[in-house]
Image (cartoon, rainbow, N blue to C red):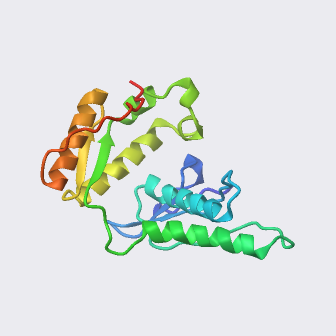
């Protein structure tokens, strides 16, 4: 495959990333991707929602913000068109939720830790293609993208140091939630969540 010599092409097929990146000017770049993802579900609307969310995740993984979308589908001509319609409807639902104008959460908790520490917590039974098919540089870019989002909206982001113990992380989360609600919040009696150390 030919390799682009255009210096504005920042990321291309050679790095096997989630998207290509093209520099527009000194401060902005275009993140571009076409995703073909087949969720393993029977419900067509759920299928579309999962596929749409997965496509958006490729943009987020590259540190971008979705502005436009192009939908593609391989669908048998003789199949029920209502199924295809439901798939696209589900995809649009996922896009609408991700791109709701002006609507943002009051509080976003970012459990942050270095990519190396996160990958060290993955047990052999937990390994997915997300871990197996991407190098450490990819995982660092994902982390950097989330940290950039937090820096852009410090009024609603709380960055929690996830290198600490599960109990310390939980305490900080409950403190942040209490601060948002205007007072202390007692941790409910709930089964503990498994956290690989």
Residue with the most extreme right position: 78
Observer-nearest residue: 130 or 76? 76
Task: Indicate the position of residue 71 as horizontal and vertical percent values.
Answer: 62, 71
Observer-nearest residue: 142 or 28? 142
Q: Quadrant of residue 172?
A: top left
- How many numbered discs, if any? 0
Observer-nearest residue: 73 or 28? 73
Q: Residue at x 75, y 66 (%)?
A: 74
Q: Is residue 120 above or below residue 50?
A: above
Residue with the most extreme left position: 183
Q: Is residue 15 above or below residue 52?
A: above
Indicate left or right for 82 with 120 as reference: right
Residue with the most extreme front position: 189
Observer-nearest residue: 114 or 161? 161
Report whether residue 88 is seen: yes
Task: Indicate the position of residue 143 as horizontal and vertical percent values.
Answer: 37, 45
Q: Is residue 69 above or below residue 143?
A: below
Indicate left or right for 19 with 155 as reference: right
Indicate left or right for 143 with 171 as reference: right
Report whether residue 4 is seen: no
- From the image, which quarter does the N terminus lie in? bottom right
Q: Residue at x 57, y 26 (%)?
A: 125
Q: Residue at x 45, y 31 (%)?
A: 119
Q: Residue at x 59, y 53 (%)?
A: 13
């Amino acid at each position: 495959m030919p390799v682009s010599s255009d210096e504005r092409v920042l990321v291309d097929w050679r790095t096997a990333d989630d998207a290509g990146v093209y520099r527009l000017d000194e401060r902005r770049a275009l993140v571009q991707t076409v995703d073909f993802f087949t969720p393993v579900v029977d419900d067509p609307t759920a299928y579309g929602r999962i596929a749409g969310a997965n496509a958006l995740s490729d943009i987020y993984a590259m540190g971008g913000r979705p502005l436009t979308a192009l939908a593609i589908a391989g669908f048998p001509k003789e199949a029920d068109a209502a199924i295809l319609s439901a798939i696209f409807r589900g995809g649009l639902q996922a896009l609408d939720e991700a791109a709701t104008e002006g609507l943002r959460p009051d509080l976003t908790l970012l459990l942050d830790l270095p990519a190396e520490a996160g990958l060290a917590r993955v047990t052999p039974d937990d390994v997915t293609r997300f871990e197996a098919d991407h190098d450490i540089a990819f995982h660092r870019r994902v982390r950097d993208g989330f940290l950039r989002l937090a820096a852009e909206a410090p009024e609603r982001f709380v960055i929690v140091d996830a290198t600490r113990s599960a109990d310390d992380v939980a305490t900080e989360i409950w403190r942040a939630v209490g601060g948002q609600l205007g007072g202390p919040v007692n941790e409910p009696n709930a089964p503990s969540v498994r956290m690989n150390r």
